[in-house]
Image (cartoon, rainbow, N blue to C red):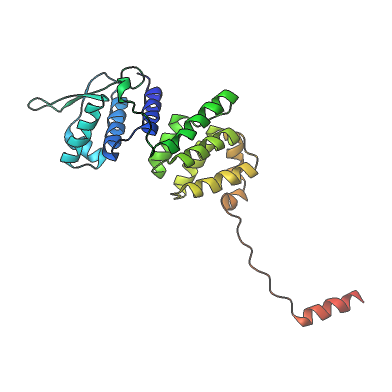
């Protein structure tokens, strides 16, 4: 199983199908653990660990697990005495039963243009955001609606993905929590003509850049000119 292909397949499935948020967060948690243990075919995970990672109650975990089993996304074996339950992730790229892919409903058709857009981008050779970047965004900013995902693809094509990734890290360090905050950084760096990580390092090290990466510092308004100042200036011209 290739982790990036599997994650991409799961995301593609979500674009066309409905799943509870608890099922989604459980799959991502199991996927993370699977990656941590070296992508082993089967692995043990205590319920307490999954409850902590997902924020689900015990019953919520049971329901989410049942959803993933029913859709064929995982295989589950109840833990024997003194041992944690055993999980196995089924490949979404090769092993998922095609019947689980439902026809798009009215509530999901609005996401179809995004898929068409990605295909068109690939056809034209335009760069798109990798799964790694999208996951990094989700982990630090929260949900990733289609319109934000499209914007991230646009920025990766405009600035290159490594610049966008650095902008995400920079925004997080500065306490930014919204896409609009991130986009202000990207707009500023785009105006500065940054094309590589090396350009970015030089830019950030510049004394002026430290205070102007996001917003131009406002100058204190000059003291209004008085009538006396105006008359004195006219006298100097004579």
Q: Which of the 4 image quarters holds residue 43?
A: top left
Q: Position of residue 218 (x, y in %)?
A: 61, 61
Q: Position of residue 225 (x, y in %)?
A: 74, 76
Compared to 70, does 224 lie above or below? below
Residue 220 falls left or right of residue 6: right
- Residue positioned 86% across, 77% down in the render: 234
Q: Residue furthest bottom?
A: 228
- Residue positioned 74% across, 80% down in the render: 226
Q: Position of residue 164 (x, y in %)?
A: 52, 37
The quadrant the C terminus occupies is bottom right
Residue 102 falls left or right of residue 236: left
Q: Position of residue 130 (x, y in %)?
A: 47, 29
Compared to 234, does 149 lie above or below? above
The quadrant the N terminus occupies is top left
Using the image as rendered, state which of residue 135 and residue 234 is in the foreground: 135
Compared to 54, does 130 lie above or below? above
Q: Residue furthest right?
A: 238
- Residue positioned 40% across, 27% down in the render: 8
Residue 216 falls left or right of residue 10: right
Residue 122 visible, this orientation: yes
Residue 91 visible, this orientation: no
- Residue positioned 53% across, 46% down in the render: 183
Q: Which of the 4 image quarters holds residue 93?
A: top left
Using the image as rendered, state which of residue 201 and residue 219 is in the foreground: 219
How many labels sit on residues? 0
Q: Residue furthest front?
A: 106
């Amino acid at each position: 199983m290739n982790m990036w292909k599997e994650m991409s397949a799961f995301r593609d499935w979500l674009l066309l199908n409905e799943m509870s948020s608890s099922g989604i967060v459980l799959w991502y948690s199991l996927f993370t653990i699977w990656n941590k243990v070296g992508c082993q075919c089967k692995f043990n995970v205590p319920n307490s660990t999954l409850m902590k990672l997902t924020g689900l109650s015990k019953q919520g975990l049971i329901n989410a697990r049942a959803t993933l089993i029913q859709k064929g996304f995982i295989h589950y074996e109840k833990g024997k005495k003194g041992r944690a339950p055993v999980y196995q992730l089924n490949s979404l790229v090769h092993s998922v039963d095609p019947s689980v892919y439902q026809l798009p409903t009215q509530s999901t058709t609005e996401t179809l243009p995004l898929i068409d857009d990605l295909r068109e981008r690939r056809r034209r050779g335009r760069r798109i955001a990798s799964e790694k970047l999208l996951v990094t965004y989700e982990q630090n900013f929260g949900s990733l609606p289609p319109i934000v995902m499209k914007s991230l693809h646009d920025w990766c094509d405009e600035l290159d993905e490594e610049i966008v990734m650095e902008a995400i890290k920079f925004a997080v360090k500065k306490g930014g929590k919204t896409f609009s905050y991130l986009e202000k950084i990207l707009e500023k760096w785009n105006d500065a003509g940054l094309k590589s990580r090396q350009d970015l390092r030089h830019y950030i090290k510049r004394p002026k850049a430290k205070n102007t990466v996001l917003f131009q510092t406002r100058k204190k308004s000059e003291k209004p000119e008085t009538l006396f100042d105006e008359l004195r200036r006219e006298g100097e011209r004579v």
